[in-house]
Amino acid sequence: MKKLLLTTALLFLFISCSSPDDRPFDQLETTLQETVTNCRACHDQGQVTGAPNIFGLQSWHLREQVIKFKAGARGGDLGTVQAQAMHQSVKNIPEDDLIAAARWFAGQERPAFKATIQGDAKLGERLYQENCASCHNKAFLKIVTHSPEIDKLEDWYFVQQCNNFDQGFRGGDLDNDHGKSMKEKIKRVKKENFKDLAAYLQSLK
């Protein structure tokens, strides 16, 4: 119980240090403008580069992911080509600059995305409630398990990441316990049903 309370307290502190930055681009410091511009070179191209649009995603989650990429917990030798490219792009950027960029992207308006994947949204809803909602919907468990708001993700990227967890590209030994847990839980859903989950999440937008 003490460990759980400590974990929760630390996460609240982590989140409080990751508040979004909603300043317009032209009001940012020159160094931050350069970091943001470098990020957008790939992330504005979407599926072309395999890099998702990160405008308006949760600040704490973006922060956690850039730290993982910088350290190689994502994008290491066993990562996908796209993840390895991300690791190479950020590994020499100071962590404070990456966190500042994550906060800025989180503070921007999330654009609307059209569906790119066809699936059975009704089946996806059932699968979601059975396998995903307990962590990704319930407030307390979202904090404990570091579960982001996956309904904000582009459908193609959501399916890509389901496949990455399923195939072991994410959730490996260098990842934290939450990534490892996700790697195991995704096995509950058949690969052919990932598109149905994506269709359901897309229907919520």
Image (cartoon, rainbow, N blue to C red):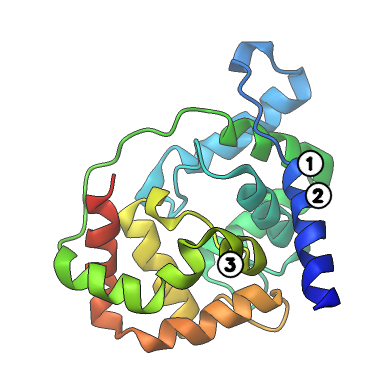
SS state under label 3: helix
Q: Judge from the rendering whether residue 4 lies leftward or rightward of residue 182; answer left or right.
A: right
Q: Quadrant of residue 146?
A: bottom right
**Disc 1 residue type?**
Cys
Lower position in the chain sequence, tag 3 or tag 2: 2
Real-space Cα distance between discs 1 and 3? 20 Å
What kind of residue is marked 3? Answer: Leu
Q: Quadrant of the C terminus?
A: top left
- Within 10 Å of disc 3 (Cα), the crowding (few <14, some 14-19, many 20+) is some
Question: Is residue 198 visible in this depiction of the protein?
Answer: yes
Instruction: Please name the residue that numbered disc 2 is placed on.
Output: 13
Residue at the spot 33% in from the left edge and 71% down from the top edge = 128
Q: Which residue is mark 1?
A: 17
Front of the two marks 2 and 1 = 2
Spot occupied by residue 94 in the image (x, y as percentages of width and height)? 83, 43
| The N terminus - image quarter | bottom right
